[in-house]
Image: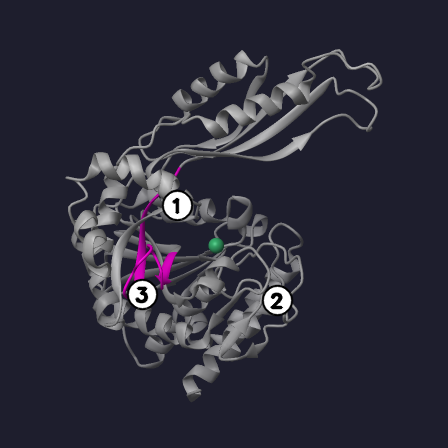
């Protein structure tokens, strides 16, 4: 490991060691700030340090003054992490550095993003560099619980008349197998997020003792409904502009028939829409609104028929699918099974970044320059990020941290054995330094 790699490994490890578990206690966030101040003295002396939520929040921002304020740049990440459950190879908050990796909760979601961005600014300050434009580092404290940290940052910017030209947040990464049959790693550059809704389906009855059960108990109806949803295409898949941009972008990393079909994805639209969702769950998620049942509740005892039983589903709306219409459709189907539909938290898909814009192209060009062995493609994000908040004040909200991740590392997101290669952190810092130097 080079000296630089050792410093990065140690630095990220120390951030991972502070258990900033989302929504648990605020002490760890205070400790986290102390650690940032210790590791990044250049940032703390050259930048304005801002707590945009005051006493209310642990979100933190840094303003690095540039030569101009005409095209502000926002670099985002979140300080919080999800709880660490299950059996881990190394204790989740040990930040163990072993096998060329940093291990622990947050190492790739997304203290790596936070580290790479703030470290790149620290190094550039040390080199005497002044950015062409104002740069804001915005680190929320509750992304994992869809909290208000990012809102505080956005509102501070708005209140101070700052209209970011570009915002970059977590989202995509550089992955080995973005699509079956890929010949090289690809940076998946997030341009849009799917919408989101949790829906509770409730079936009622008069209850009673389980020793003389009537027909059509709440769980029987719920089971029929769930089975119906799984066996039918409730939400029609279709080719959205985002899916089209992604498939075309991936074509250069494919060979043979797959390369040809994805390159001409507009021509092959009908075939792709028909076949891809049947081939993989990924295809179904790429081309349509998805729904999966995640929770169930019945009576309080094994021998009591529930008066009220429920199952909760999680929906991810495809861009262009109106949440109200989707929910109306579900309500109609559920009613046929004598089931009520109660939507809970709900949001639409985000707007899409213009992939022909100069700002998007500059991001992609920088990725290809820093990682010449990789490709880059637009990416439709199935999950959610803080960037949807920032998106309301910027035309270009890019969701990607160009760090290389292997399939095990991707699968470890929100699971056990989360880790990142030290070399990926080195690549990430290189990327952001190059990006910042060339951003005008
Ligand atoms: Zn994250």
Q: Quadrant of the C terminus?
A: bottom left
Earlier-in-chain disc, 2 versus 3: 2
Q: Is mark 1 within 8 Å of ligand 1?
A: no
- The residue positioned 63% from the left and 70% from the top of the image is 89
Mark 2, ligand 1, within 8 Å: the answer is no
282 shown above or below 368: above
Give x and y (percent) for residue 119. 41, 73
Asked if the stretch drawn in magenta spans residue 438, the answer is no
Which residues are the magenta region? 172-194
Q: Secondary structure at mark 2?
A: loop
Q: Which mark is residue 18?
A: 2
Position of 410 with respect to 174 (left or right) is right
> Mark 1 and 2 residues: CB-CB less than 8 Å, in contact?
no
Whether the magenta-drawn stretch holds residue 173 is answered as yes
Q: Secondary structure at mark 1?
A: helix
Seen at 36% across and 39% down, the residue is 277
Q: CA distance from mark 1 to mark 2?
A: 34 Å
The image shows residue 310 at horizontal and vertical percentages of 65, 25
Picture coordinates of residue 327, whole percent (x, y) = 45, 22
- The kind of secondary structure element at disc 3 is loop
- Give the residue at mark 3: 185
Q: Nearer the viewer, residue 331 or 65?
A: 331
Q: Is mark 3 within 8 Å of ligand 1?
A: no
Crowding at mark 1 (Cα within 10 Å: few <14, some 14-19, many 20+): few
In the visual, does 276 lie left or right of 207? left
Q: Is residue 359 visible?
A: no
Q: CA gap, disc 2 to disc 3?
A: 32 Å
Q: Which residue is mark 1?
A: 282
């Amino acid at each position: 490991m080079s000296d630089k790699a050792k410093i990065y490994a140690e630095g990220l490890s120390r951030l991972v060691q502070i258990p900033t578990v989302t929504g648990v206690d605020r002490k760890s966030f205070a400790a986290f700030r102390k650690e940032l101040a210790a590791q990044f003295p250049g940032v703390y002396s050259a930048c304005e340090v801002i707590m945009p939520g005051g006493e209310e929040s642990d979100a933190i921002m840094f303003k690095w003054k540039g030569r101009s304020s005409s095209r502000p740049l926002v670099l985002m990440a979140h300080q919080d992490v999800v709880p660490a459950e299950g059996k881990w190879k190394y204790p989740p908050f040990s930040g163990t550095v072993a096998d060329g990796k940093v291990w622990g909760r947050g190492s790739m979601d997304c203290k790596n993003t936070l580290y790479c961005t703030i470290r790149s600014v620290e190094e550039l300050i040390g080199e005497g560099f002044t950015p062409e434009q104002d740069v804001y580092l915005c680190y929320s404290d509750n992304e994992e619980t869809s909290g208000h940290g990012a809102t505080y940052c956005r509102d501070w910017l708005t209140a101070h008349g700052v209209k970011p030209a570009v915002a970059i947040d977590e989202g995509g990464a550089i992955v080995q197998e973005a699509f079956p049959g890929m010949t090289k790693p690809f940076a998946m550059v997030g341009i849009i997020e799917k919408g989101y809704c949790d829906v509770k389906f409730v079936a009622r009855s008069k209850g009673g003792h389980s020793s003389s059960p009537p027909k059509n108990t709440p769980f029987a109806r719920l089971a029929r409904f769930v089975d119906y949803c799984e066996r039918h295409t409730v939400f029609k898949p279709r080719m959205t502009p985002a899916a089209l941009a992604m498939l075309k972008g991936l074509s250069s990393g494919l060979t043979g028939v797959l390369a040809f079909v994805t390159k001409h994805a507009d021509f092959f639209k009908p075939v792709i829409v028909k076949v891809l969702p049947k081939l993989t769950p990924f295809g179904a998620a790429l081309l349509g609104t998805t729904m999966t049942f995640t929770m169930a509740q019945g009576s309080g005892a094994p021998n009591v028929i529930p008066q009220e039983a429920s199952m909760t589903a999680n929906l991810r709306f495809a861009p262009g699918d109106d949440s109200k219409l989707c929910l109306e459709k579900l309500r109609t189907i559920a009613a046929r099974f004598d089931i009520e539909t109660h939507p809970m938290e709900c949001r639409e898909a985000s707007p899409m970044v213009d992939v022909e814009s100069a700002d998007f192209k500059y991001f992609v060009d920088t990725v290809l320059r820093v990682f010449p062995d990789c490709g880059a493609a637009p990416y439709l994000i199935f999950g959610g990020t803080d960037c949807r908040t920032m998106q309301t004040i910027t035309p270009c909200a890019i969701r990607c941290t160009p760090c290389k991740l292997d399939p095990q590392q991707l699968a470890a997101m929100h699971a056990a054995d989360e880790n990142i290669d030290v070399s990926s952190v080195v690549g990430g810092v290189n990327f952001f330094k190059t990006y910042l130097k060339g951003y005008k």
